[in-house]
Image: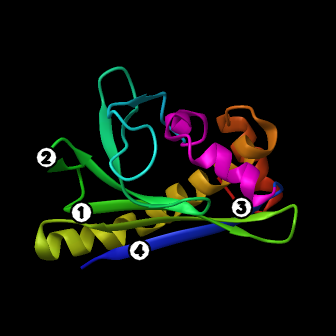
Amino acid sequence: MTQEVSTQVIIDLPVAQAWQKLRDISLAHHYVPGIVKTEIVSERAEGVGASRYVYRNAKSYIQETVEEWQDGQGFLIRLHKGDKNAPPFKNGWFRYQLQEQGAQQTLLTTSLKYELPWGPAGRWLEKKLAGFVDKTVADVAYSMKLFYETGEPTSKSALQVFKNSLGEVK
């Protein structure tokens, strides 16, 4: 069964400025917690077919390829590793979506849509991982807000301070 988890956050930038940062798919390591390096691996650096590797360390990576592109608004990426789906997913996609919220603000929506393999065991695991998945998707949105507004890569401590300001616990 396919699951979808989303988080929304207001970025204090006009949508055009937020889009200039979002469209650069080489920047993921500045705002995705746990990612240490991003490498463009396709001829295209943006648009449908653009593809990147995102690394958790020097050897561990997943590939992300743009499947939908809405200029000025966002895109959908498929999570995979070559011809195979990115573990642990049977299928997985991540969507970044921007929407104007007045002249100086942008609503960012980050969404993970996924399906786990393993039938009943996968459904059991989905329930066990639900909180972790929710937190991960939210952390991406919050980290993007911080990076977009400051121009500085988001650190763990900056993310924690922001989450504390929202009343979230560790």
State the separation of the CA atoms marked 3 and 4: 21 Å
Residue 59 lies, with reference to residue 155, above or below; the image says above
- Mark nearest the camera among 2 and 1 is 2
Q: Main secondary structure of the magenta part?
A: helix
Q: Give how far apart the Cα atoms at labels 2 and 3 are.
A: 38 Å
Q: Amino acid at mark 1?
A: Asn
Q: Quadrant of residue 58?
A: top left
Q: Secondary structure at mark 3?
A: loop
User: What residue lies at 60% left-to-right and 41% top-to-bottom?
Assistant: 31
* Magenta residues (range): 14-32
- For residue 28: magenta? yes
User: Compared to 55, does 163 lie above or below?
Assistant: below
The answer to whether marks 1 and 4 mark residues whose Cβ atoms lie closer than 8 Å is: no
The span from disc 1 to disc 4 (Cα, nearest Å) is 12 Å
- Foreground pick, 57 / 109: 109
Q: Which mark is residue 91?
A: 1
* Residue under pointer 3: 168
**Which marked residue is nearer to the observer: mark 1 or mark 3?**
1
